[in-house]
Image: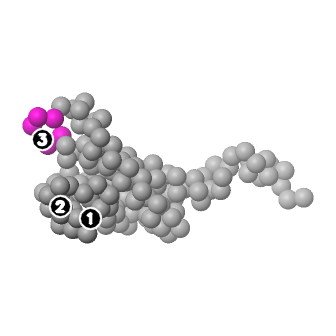
């Protein structure tokens, strides 16, 4: 696997975890939800799925641009808002109307839970940018080709 694909894999991992953690943080604010129930609830696992699918768009952008951590943190805020929108497009609520009204649900959630989503988005974006800029160690055939050199 090429180093670029492994860099994209790093972004996918971070976005999936941040999507899941964002859903868990929102669910944990409700009184009747226990900590363990918040971790394994289906809606929260769908948050991880939305983060995974969001990384299909943002992963190549992060890997190709390799932004510095401070810019990645700012881009993380934009990615978070698009992730919340994607969540409501994929999994609309009964009160939402239809999938095209997802922007209204996203606006309510971002406006209500900004204190949880903001730090997670900044941390996730910064971590993605930092991890993408880290060197990728060669593996398998890449390591052998590097050791033998050009023929």
The residues bearing labels 1 and 2 have C-alpha atoms spaced at a distance of 8 Å
The residues bearing labels 2 and 3 have C-alpha atoms spaced at a distance of 20 Å
The residues bearing labels 3 and 1 have C-alpha atoms spaced at a distance of 25 Å
Q: How is the image coloured?
A: one colour
Q: Pointer 1: what residue?
A: 99
Above or below, 46 against 98 in this view is above
Which residue corresponds to the image point at 23% horizontal and 54% vertical from the top-left?
A: 117
Which residue corresponds to the image point at 27% horizontal and 44% vertical from the top-left?
A: 43
Q: Residues within 10 Å of mark 2 (few under 14, many from 20)?
A: some
Give the SS element for disc 2: helix
Q: Nearer the viewer, mark 2 or mark 3?
A: 2
C-beta proximity under 8 Å, tags 3 and 1: no
- Determine if residue 116 is in view: yes
Residue 84, by quadrant, is bottom left
Label 3 or label 1, whichever comes before in sequence order? 3
Q: Pointer 2: what residue?
A: 96
Instruction: Please tell me which residue lies in front, 86 or 19.
Output: 86
C-beta proximity under 8 Å, tags 1 and 2: yes
Q: Pointer 3: what residue?
A: 30
Q: Which residues are magenta?
A: 28-33
Give the SS element for disc 3: loop
Is 30 colored magenta in this rendering? yes
Is 61 colored magenta in this rendering? no
Q: Residues within 10 Å of mark 3 (few under 14, many from 20)?
A: few
Residue 102, by quadrant, is bottom left
Could you tell me residue 57's position as x and y percent? 44, 65
Could you tell me residue 7's position as x and y percent? 54, 56
Q: Nearer the viewer, mark 3 or mark 1?
A: 1
Give the SS element for disc 1: helix
Instruction: Please tell me which residue lies in front, 131 or 11.
Output: 11
């Amino acid at each position: 696997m090429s180093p670029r694909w492994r860099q994209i894999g790093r972004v996918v991992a971070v976005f999936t975890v941040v999507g899941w953690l964002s859903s868990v943080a929102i669910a944990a604010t409700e009184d009747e939800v226990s900590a363990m129930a918040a971790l394994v609830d289906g809606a929260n696992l769908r948050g991880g799925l939305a983060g995974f699918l969001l990384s299909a768009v943002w992963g190549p952008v992060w890997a190709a641009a390799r932004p510095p951590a401070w810019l990645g943190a700012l881009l993380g805020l934009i990615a978070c808002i698009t992730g919340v929108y994607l969540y409501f497009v994929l999994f609309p609520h009964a009160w939402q109307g239809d999938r095209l009204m997802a922007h209204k649900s996203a606006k309510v959630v971002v406006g209500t839970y900004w204190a949880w989503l903001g730090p997670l988005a900044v941390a996730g974006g910064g971590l993605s940018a930092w991890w993408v800029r880290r060197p990728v160690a060669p593996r398998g055939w890449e390591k052998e080709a590097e050791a033998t050199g050009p023929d």
